Image (spheres, rainbow, N blue to C red):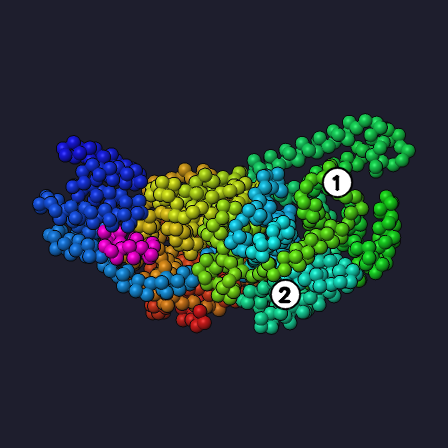
Amino acid sequence: MALNAKVAAEFKKRGNDAFKTGNFVKAVNLYSKAEKSDPRDPVYPSNLSAALFEAGNYVACIDAVLRAYKLLKEQQEPADKSSLLIRLSSRLAKALLNSAQSDPETLTTLKKYEAEYQELKENAFSTPSSAASTSDLSRVWYDWESFELQLQDGPRNREACLRELSKLPPFMKPLDDGKEYYSIGHDPVIDLTAGFGSEMQGKPASSLNISKLSTARLSQLAFLFGGVGDGRHAFGTLAGLFKEYQQLSENRKAAFHAHLTFLDIHPTAIARDLSMLVLLNDLNNATKPLTRTEIKATLMYTFCGLAMPSYCYDILMNTAKSLCEKLTEHPPALPPWLHVEAKSIPAILRALDYWINTEKSTSRVLAREGDYNLDEELEAFTASGGAGFRSEVKTLYDDQRKQIEKMFRELPDDKLLELPWMPHGVTVSQARTIIESNMDELVRSMQQLHATGKVPTHERAWYKVAKVFLPPAELRSRHPGFDTVWEKLVAGGDFSPSEARKIATHVTNQWKANITLYDAMYNDPKYHPDGDGYRTSSGDAFEAVNFIEDFVNGNKPRKNGITNTVDTLAWDIFNAFFDKIAKAIEGLGDHLTIELLVGGLAEELAKMRTKADVTRPAAFPRKFTRMWLSNVPDYTHGPMNMALYVVPNLQDLPEAGASCNCLLNTGSWENDDSYFYNYTYLLIKDVPRYLGCQVINPQAVMDVLVLGSLPLPRPRSELASRDELTNWLTRVLFSTFLPGKPRLPPQSVRLPHNIVAFFELLMHLSRVGFPVHWLSDFLARVLSGSMVSDIAPYSGFLPIPLSEMHRRVPSRRVRTDPWLVEFENIIATGYHAIPFPIAYALPEGFSREPEDIRVWEVRTTPTQPFAIMWGFFSNNGSPYEPTARLLFYRPSQTTPAEVIKGLHSVFEGATSHAPGSFFILTAQDVMQYDKRIRFRLSRRRVEKMKEEKWAMLAYRQDTGLQAIKPVPVDRWLLVEEY
């Protein structure tokens, strides 16, 4: 036995060393060996229980505590029995609380220990000890017993709190609630059944392999597109689904069902997609060839035309009017495969009504169409980049120019004279003079060919004059002069100025502007002083045509990248495309559901996850096989937001994934690690260790970012250590309090996450598998009102440089009290659903009742008119930057200017603003700075604020601009319907 005791002591010593370094998994292993070596000593299971607790294995900790207690009872009054008994009792109460709060389903397991832990508790309290020990012991057991009482109505309260938490806005808002409307996309068409989009840039395909899915999985195929924009990727996936469906056996076809969710924050985008879907349904119902041609022409011009023939416009308007009628029926009178989510209908109706009752001048629309210039596009693309990025792209571009120039200059004489555009009969010397005189234009055309993979068609020459795509041949007789000019172009000739004027006059007088490219903001004098705004189009009008052509041809490169012929029309391509999509809809029949939903991506997915999506049919999917997010993450905090709000809504499939691209600020990134670090404060390799998801493809900057799920919780050995987690959370929190400064477009990098999103991060980390008491302890430090740290928030211009990961400052005490009221709002709202203990750390007076958090509204008076505040973005920044915050303050103790200007100093504890004299809210329910603002506060807190005569105002956290005049507390209105 002495030998065993010696071995056990050695295991314990090594276990202590591992414990001190934070390697709790290793400590558990060594303490377990110590207990097995000497099973009669209570110290070893006690040590083991401590390591198990720190590792987050609370049920095993409880078991080890009770084993130690049993051995302790059998011993004859050891010297440290009282001390050990109190430690075991305290650890037991903490383990019970953390176990039950992190996973209420463990309660059944815990019940079997009830008699034993009650005995241990009573014996510990009857043991002589210091007053401090008794007080601490009383507190931890009180916390557990209070939680036990709370659990009596646990499931109902927990679910209700989760639903309410999902409704809290996770983003800071712009001061103005106007939404930018992006009508025509800029991506190659993606078929999510074939991959995530990266294969189009030469990457290996990531096929869904539908033919190999189980029958159960076949019936649960679900795809989400958010923001869906012009719907091209949803249409592409529809075609891919039908192709896969056709290859299934009859039995598997019977099991097959696909659900596609079209999601966009802008109702006009959803109204536009809905109109195209209804037109596709009409196409399937049409039998006359001419009618089918007219419908497909309408689809083409709606999809990417600036203007359309009047007969297409009439079809589009009839569709809009019909939808207005059908959407007001209960339920809406739509095709059986098409569903519009109920709460989205009012906003869609407003968009349709705007189109029906608004006309834009065709001449003014076409006058805003600029000629595509590859040099200007390159300049715009690199403008937002760092010096390294700009230099690299410019070098590639210049090298390409030199190679093309060299190719032309070194052409053999016979090849030179054979160039198709070289005038007949010229000498070699004359030909070389022609080359040199037109070198810039020749190089530009060749670079365009290289960029698009297409030889410019005759229709490009047509488009320069007409600014519209040529109608199909069957309809061209309705357009005087079109056939004549087109035949001349095809024959290699040119047309006269008078013919060009005739075409332009006909288009101006007889064609209608594509009104679906506009929303009501274009007619709002606030945004367009004349009340009749027009969009400017400067990109390549044939970009969408080229992408659709690639898709129709299976994204297979052709020899020399040449289209079918130089006579190929946009119509030829869209005719084939919309035929393909219509056949997919018809062929899938009742095996298909398409859902249209207006809302923010993160917000709607959060509601689905907590079953707060009460206006969606209960049978609709809440988890998705694959998602395409476009470049929405550019606006919503990048991969951090994806990990918290998107990846949890993926199905548990190895093929599942969520993908996006980066378009808003592509040139701002040195590499993909700099992209990830800016949004997450993590390198790519560390994302699974902290956020619990896999990075399937990290190439966000120049390709496609793809994130996938991992089984949760993760093994403790695969996660960050406690010190690593604490340091990372501190950095994320401080940057949420005081974010860096955004630049103007096209260098705009947005970090809109607010404290709601930070709290969701804590909730998420509990699901990832981090011990919940780590999260409790961290939040308790925050809620104390101050923290000691050597980490400082980044205060420079975004993006956050990689060098920040190593930056430290002398350790000092910083203040967190200005942001604690927002934590009260969140904690009280979700009190019964928070998966880690927090009651013990709540400041005095903090609300714990969800019903106490109410929505308040203030009517506002702006400090400056909109035009002055946002004029040319001036020094005040883009109006669309999500930087709005609310300042609440006591006028008798401070002024807004002092607080806003000195907020960094307040955080650092360098100014004398007393705690309780002001606070900040980073989340608002409604933010329209020149009309009204809605926010959440405890009703009891507001009553006290009335006694103390508080006031509030809205400001921009990046510039310090005060947007509204102060609103005293007696003018805050309680919003009863919330």
> Looking at this rendering, what residue extends furthest in the right direction?
425
Please check the rendered image and state whether residue 36 is part of the magenta-colored stretch, yes or no. Answer: no
Q: Residue at x 78, y 60 (%)?
A: 289
Q: Is residue 376 above or below residue 970?
A: above
Main secondary structure of the magenta stretch: helix
Q: Quadrant of residue 582?
A: bottom right
Q: Secondary structure at mark 1?
A: loop
Please name the residue shown 33% across and 56% down the image.
105
| Picture quarter with the N terminus | top left
| Residue at the (20%, 47%) spot, across then down | 67
587 or 736: which is nearer to us? 587
Q: Which residues are magenta?
A: 92-113
Q: Which residue is mark 1?
A: 562
Q: Tell me where residue 489 appears, x and y as whole percent.
A: 84, 47
Marks 1 and 2 sit apart, C-alpha to C-alpha, by: 40 Å
Q: With 970 as the anchor, is 371 left or right in this view?
A: right
Percent across and percent down for residue 705 are: 54, 44
Residue type marked 2 = Pro
Q: Amino acid at mark 1?
A: Ile
In the picture, the disc for residue 335 is 2
Q: Is residue 100 magenta?
A: yes
Choose top left, top right, bottom left or bottom right for residue 806.
Answer: top left
Question: In the depicted view, which residue is nearer to us: 249 or 74?
Answer: 249
